[in-house]
Image (spheres, grey):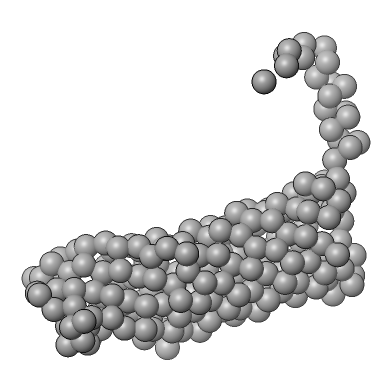
Amino acid sequence: MSAQFGILSSTNLRHVQTANGDKPMPSAKHLPLALALMTTTAPTMAANAGDAYVGGGFTRTSYDEQGAPEFNPSALIGRLGYYVTDNIAVEGRLGFGLSSDETSARLNGMNVTGELDIERLAGAYAVAHLPVTGAMSVYGLAGFSYAEAEITASAGGLSGSLTRDDTGFSYGVGAQAGLTEAISGYVEWASYLDQDAYEATGITIGASYGF
């Protein structure tokens, strides 16, 4: 499983080669009052058992394989979650690629140009939140992900494409802040697949709606 998603290994290269194909500034004396007002008017985003949410974000992924250049395709990942306790949720995600990434390297004495495009990503996770303030929390997640990508490569006048998929353990950390009583924004880093031959991670900025 861990080796099959590696895209620029000599084995995959041989397969590819045969495919061919605007206001005044407040004074300092006003700052304590402004901070107090911000604290009392910030939206509260405490979640309770039985609450649900839906959201999504833009993800910049990083695919790093041993002995090969790094690829950074982008993706859009949606999420749907349900709080089983006040601070712990179960969450499902589904995503697809927005843009591919292309890079070149010299492998086995040949100039190889490769392109990686995320076809889809799906996963199920447990998400544990630690409230920092009434309007902000940090969280960690763990679960399993499935990813599928299309690999296009050319070398020595030959070109072709392959589709690879893999499944594995995932983990990550993030921070979430309330924007309104129902809408929150979040930023997150996650390792979706961490195998012997490669690692696929992502940094996401997004928003969620609670109901």
Q: Is residue 82 left or right of residue 68?
A: right
Q: Position of residue 110 (x, y in %)?
A: 10, 70
In the image as oriented, which residue stretches furthest toward the front? 22
Residue drawn at (37%, 84%), measured in percent from left and top? 163
Question: Residue at left 73%, top 16%?
Answer: 23
Residue 154 occupies which quadrant of the picture? bottom left
Left or right of 36? Residue 137 is left
Instruction: Please identify the quadrant where the C terminus is shown.
Output: bottom right
Is residue 191 something that shows in the picture? yes
Residue at horizontal 37 percent and vertical 78 percent from the top: 150
| Viewer-nearest residue: 14 or 192 | 14
Q: Residue at x 89, y 72 (%)?
A: 50
Location of residue 90 with respect to 27 vertically, above or below: below
Q: Quadrant of residue 85?
A: bottom right
* Residue 79 rendering spot, x and y as whole percentages: 67, 69
Query: Which residue is more in the foreground, 128 or 149?
Result: 149
The reply, left or right, for residue 154 in relation to residue 194 is left
Q: Position of residue 18 (x, y in %)?
A: 17, 87
56 or 12: nearer the eye?
Answer: 56
Q: Position of residue 75 (x, y in %)?
A: 50, 65
